[in-house]
Image: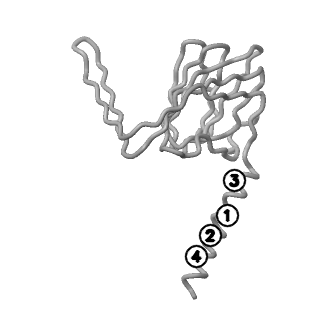
């Protein structure tokens, strides 16, 4: 009987937390994401070595199935993704306009500004962030995202309260 009560209370806590997260989530606006391609991968085990004249190495290792998305994202002037996270990491390339990124764990709300040709990494895994077009012309990016197979690609998050927008 006690075990059932604890299970019920734990389930209730999860339900309330999920509901509060949805209620406090910041909506996207003036933002249009579209999926260009998605592929399913089995275990990935890739490693590169340093080149003789450059310092460079990379390693990518997964266990189990993964989904890789290629996303095209467009922001109107003033558009925002809303605060969110992803279950895996993303490589993002700005293709037009200017994108400003803010990190959910940055109490100073420092803007990180990216222009066409610049790339940046969203580490995912609970890393909350928002991407905004604070310019006067349309902005766009291409993102490649690696996530666990069948996982929800985007998870809305509440405003962490560090930024005044």
Tell which circle, 3 or 4, labels the residue nearer the N-terminal end: 4
Name the residue that disc number 3 marks.
21
- Disc 3 versus disc 2: nearer the observer: 2
Between 97 and 40, which is closer to the camera in this rendering?
Answer: 40
What residue does disc 2 label? 11
Name the element at disc 4: helix
Give the CA distance from mark 3 to mark 1.
10 Å
Q: Position of residue 26 (x, y in %)?
A: 74, 42
Q: Which mark is residue 7?
A: 4
Along the polypeptide, which appears first: circle 1 or circle 4? 4
| Horizontal arrangement in the rendering, residue 47 relative to residue 147 (left or right) | left
Residue at left offset 61%, top offset 21%: 141
Q: How is the image coloured?
A: one colour
- At numbered mark 1, what does the secondary structure look like: helix, strand or loop? helix
Q: Nearer the viewer, residue 63 or 26?
A: 63
Query: Could you classify mark 1 by the number of other residues whose Cα lies within 10 Å: few (under 14), some (14-19), or many (20 or more)?
Result: few
Residue topped by disc 1: 15
The local crowd at label 3, few if under 14, some if 14 to 19, many if 20 or more residues have their Cα within 10 Å, is some
Residue 40: x %, y % from top left: 46, 37
């Amino acid at each position: 009987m006690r075990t059932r009560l604890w299970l019920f209370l734990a389930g209730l806590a999860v339900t309330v937390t999920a509901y509060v997260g949805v209620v406090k989530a910041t909506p996207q606006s003036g933002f249009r994401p579209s999926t260009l391609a998605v592929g399913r991968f089995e275990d990935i085990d890739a490693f590169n070595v340093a080149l003789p004249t450059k310092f460079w190495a990379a390693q990518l290792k997964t266990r189990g199935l993964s989904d890789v998305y290629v996303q095209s994202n467009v922001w109107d002037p003033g558009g925002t993704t809303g605060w969110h996270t992803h279950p895996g990491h993303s490589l993002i390339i700005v293709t037009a306009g200017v994108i400003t990124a803010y990190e959910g764990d940055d109490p100073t709300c420092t803007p990180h500004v990216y222009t066409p040709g610049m790339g940046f990494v969203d580490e995912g895994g609970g890393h909350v962030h928002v991407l905004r077009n604070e310019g006067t012309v349309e902005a766009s990016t291409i993102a490649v995202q690696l996530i666990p197979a069948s996982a929800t690609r985007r998870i809305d998050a509440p405003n962490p309260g560090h930024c005044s927008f």
